[in-house]
Image (cartoon, rainbow, N blue to C red):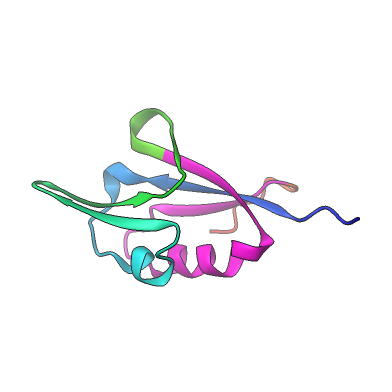
């Protein structure tokens, strides 16, 4: 059985400006938080790291959706890493 390709999404929540294109394009993994001054996206299933960074791993089944969400971000705070090659795709 062939192992599925795996990726990591790295999201810099502190620098999100709350446009919401990620949540619009991939609502199963992104949600907008509207709470006073905190009007940013949250990565559903993301694991908090230091300095407002959230990370999550995913397989090739979600690649197109995560790539679309990352490319739609006007401030480039969503990055995708290929876990096999460690290449930063976005």
Q: Which residue is drawn at 23% across and 56% down?
A: 17
Q: Which residue lies furthest to the top in this view?
A: 50
Provide residue 33's location: percent of width, then percent of height: 23, 52
Q: Give the side of residue 6 with respect to residue 36, left or right.
A: right
Q: Give the side of residue 89 with respect to residue 69, left or right.
A: right
Q: Which of 9 and 33 is in front in this view?
A: 33
Provide residue 14's location: percent of width, then percent of height: 28, 42
Q: Which residue is drawn at 65% across and 64% down?
A: 61
Which part of the image, by quadrant, shows the N terminus? bottom right
Q: Which residue is drawn at 58% across and 70% down?
A: 64
Up the image or down, 47 lies above or below 27; here it is above
Provide residue 63's location: percent of width, then percent of height: 60, 64
Q: Which of 76 and 45 is in front in this view?
A: 45
Up the image or down, 89 lies above or below 83; here it is below
Q: Does the magenta stretch include residue 62?
A: yes
Residue 73 visible? The answer is no
User: Which segment is the magenta one?
Assistant: 54-83
Q: Residue furthest left?
A: 36
Q: Is residue 55 magenta?
A: yes
Q: Nearer the viewer, residue 86 or 47?
A: 47
């Amino acid at each position: 059985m062939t192992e599925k390709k795996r990726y990591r999404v790295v999201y810099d929540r502190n620098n999100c400006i709350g446009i919401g294109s990620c949540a619009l394009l991939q609502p199963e993994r992104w949600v907008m938080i509207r709470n006073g001054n905190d009007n940013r996206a949250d990565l559903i299933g993301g694991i908090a790291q230091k300095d407002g960074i959230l990370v999550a791993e995913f397989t090739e089944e979600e690649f197109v959706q995560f790539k679309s969400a990352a490319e739609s971000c006007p401030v480039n705070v969503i990055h995708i890493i290929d876990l096999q090659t460690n290449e930063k795709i976005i």
